[in-house]
Amino acid sequence: MPNLTLEHSPNAALNKTVLAEYMSLPIPDGKCQATYIWIDGTGEHIRGKTRTLDFVPTKSDELPVWNYDGSSTYQAEGSNSDTYLYPVAIYKDPFTRGNNVIVLCDTYKYNKKPTETNKRYTCAQVMEAAKNAKPWFGIEQEYTLLDMDLRPLGWPKNGFPGPQGPYYCGVGANRVYGRDIVEAHYRACLYAGIEISGSNAEVMPAQWEYQVGPCEGITMGDQLWVSRYILHRIAEDFGVIVSFDPKPMEGDWNGAGAHSNFSTKAMREDGGILEIEKAIDKLSRNHLRHIQAYDPKGGKDNERRLTGRHETSSIHDFSAGVANRGASIRIPRGCAEEKKGYLEDRRPSSNCDPYAVTEALVRTCVLDE
């Protein structure tokens, strides 16, 4: 890790061996720490706070409802700021370990109606309506590591690295930056119970990708949000910033997406290519609706990324093709040959809400809405 980054980060300057002395202290029997996390009013960022429980939970519905100051998270007015946290999923906590848990929560306003950024609420209804189709998802989450000056990690301060080419899946100190964070994140996700299925260095230096899935229904959104939280927390320890901006560097550099792989039971069975083609036809007739659902700003963020260059399609046009990374929808070559499998929607931005993405796919391809 470059020294300049460490010198500029208060977190990285702290002595972690001192922390380890205290973290080794045992917790009293029957108690655990539960870190409640939720999506704030930006629709992109995660907040969290911790409470002590007098029992060790095994299911989310065993956990108490909690509240927080929504006026400090862009979700409420100061005069009526109590906002509610409803636990929906729990995971093992890789940071405090033992019986301690991460608790993913839905957010509700004072009147018990979902907050504007609670996309899970309607997504869960859609997944329940489509459960017989057994929708599976896998999301390829791209992100960029930044130093404290908001410059991609390892990039020269007064210049740029060499052109893209040697960095994708690269090995070597002059080709990849921040692998410690990537490896720590991979292991922490496995510990937590996330269905992380792989990782790799991406085309732009300091850009990485990990994949989560296959997950069925609502669990796709749950697991991706928790994996993002874990990534932010690990990078925090290293004094590095994680950016999900879909075009962090202007110019001849790749952007960052969240390519979304999708299938139904019928697509995965013999002859499923016909179902895949039907789904692509439906998607072609709902392009604008999907673009609006695929980033938190209704397509404004993706405008900077979906230019038709750097392995993207144009935001204005729908396209599909076998093994074509410049298309809106890619059919993997193996699926075309086996005549069954899944499709890859390459349009979602790296900062998308996975609940909104998976809901849109199921509404269009399964429920015909």
Image: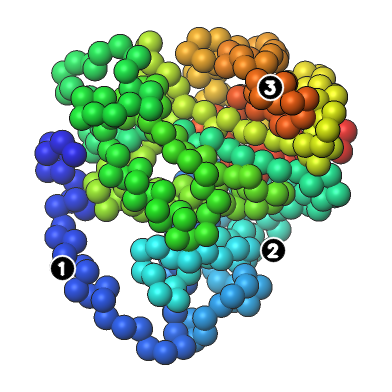
366 lies above or below 102: above
Q: Amino acid at mark 3?
A: Ile
Asked if residue 208 lies left or right of residue 212, the reply is left
- Local secondary structure at mark 3: strand
* Figure colour scheme: rainbow
Q: Which mark is residue 18?
A: 1
- Specify few, some or many for label 1: CA neighbours under 10 Å numbering under 14, 14-19, or 20 or more: few
Q: Quadrant of residue 18?
A: bottom left
Q: Residue at x 65, y 20 (%)?
A: 333
Asked if residue 329 lies left or right of residue 196, the reply is right
N-terminal-most mark, 2 or 1:
1
Proximity of marks 1 and 3: CB atoms separated by less than 8 Å: no
- Local secondary structure at mark 2: loop
x, y percentage for residue 223? 57, 52
Gap in angstroms between the C-alphas marked 2 and 1: 43 Å
- Observer-nearest of 348 and 215: 215
**Circle 3 sits on which residue?**
331
Q: Residue at x 87, y 33 (%)?
A: 368
N-terminal-most mark, 1 or 3:
1
x, y percentage for residue 230? 42, 53
Frontmost of labels 1 and 3 is 3
- Observer-nearest of 112 and 93: 93
**Circle 2 sits on which residue?**
112
